[in-house]
Amino acid sequence: MGRFSILVGDITQSDAEAIVNAANESLLGGSGVDGAIHRAAGPELLAECRTLHGCPTGQAKLTKGYQLKARYVLHTPGPVWQGGEHDEAALLASCYRSCLQLAEENGIQSVDFPCISTGVFGYPAAQAASVSLRAIMDFLRDHDTPQQVRVVCHTEEAAKVLRQMYNFWFAGTKADRL
Ligand code: APR
């Protein structure tokens, strides 16, 4: 897999240079991974987020990581799943691309993503996996930075879906040999 890998874990414990937060447009915290990251980073994260005045879906903003091991947090609001006819795929791909572009602009060499939009926002895991993998692999093909990108799945089940999609699309493994 080279520069890309999939693992199971708690992204708040990540030692990547930057972790991605599956936020909402207010950037003022929430439940899920957003809540976990804010709890782990401490109150200074929210204080900095307040200065950002929100972030449109599909775009990304950078803050420090504060009490996290990660030096930075890339905040990106994913799309809410509305059945697939409301630009959800394009917006989700834009989340991954925007975070990677911001990482490159800031010379960040390792980025860990959660599975954006697949929790509270209801994006079906397999469809989200195809979109996220395509966006990540396209960016890595065309850019040298970041050097390492990982998707940190909260559950083995989520990782299984992602690995199956990776093998189907990128490892030359046809679906019948998964
Ligand atoms: N580490 C890694 N992944 C996690 C963690 C964690 N500690 N906690 C949750 N996840 C996973 C979920 O299992 C899911 O696969 O992150 C993925 C995204 O789920 P959510 O956190 O619910 O995010 P999302 O679906 O994008 O919804 C965003 O939820 O928390 C609010 O403020 C947030 O309004 C926003 C919405």
Image (cartoon, helix red, strand yellow):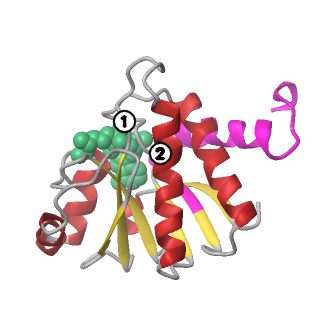
Indicate whether 174 appears above or below 72: above
Q: Dot 2 corresponds to which residue?
A: 115
Asked if the stretch drawn in magenta spans residue 119, the answer is no
Marks 1/2: CA–CA distance? 8 Å
Residue type pointed to by label 1: Gly
Q: Secondary structure at mark 2?
A: loop
In depth, the one of 19 and 25 nearer the eye is 25
Instruction: Mark 1: give few (<14), some (14-19) or many (20+) Cα within 10 Å.
Output: some
Quarter placement of the N terminus: bottom right
What numbered label is drawn on residue 119?
1
Magenta part of the chain: 150-178
Number of marks in the image?
2
Instruction: Mark 2: give few (<14), some (14-19) or many (20+) Cα within 10 Å.
Output: many
Q: Residue at x 43, y 44 (%)?
A: 116
Asked if the stretch drawn in magenta spans residue 175, the answer is yes
The answer to the question of whether label 1 and label 2 lie on touching residues, with beta carbons closer than 8 A, is yes
Q: Is mark 2 within 8 Å of ligand 1?
A: yes
- Whole-percent x and y of residue 106? 47, 80
Q: Is mark 1 within 8 Å of ligand 1?
A: yes
- Whole-percent x and y of residue 46? 14, 66
Indicate whether 17 appears above or below 39: below
Q: Left or right: where does residue 163 sit relative to residue 55?
A: right
Q: Secondary structure at mark 1?
A: loop
Q: Where, by quadrant of the figure, is residue 148 drawn?
A: bottom right
Q: Residue at x 40, y 38 (%)?
A: 117
Residue type pointed to by label 2: Cys
Q: Residue at x 59, y 39 (%)?
A: 131
Quarter placement of the C terminus: top right
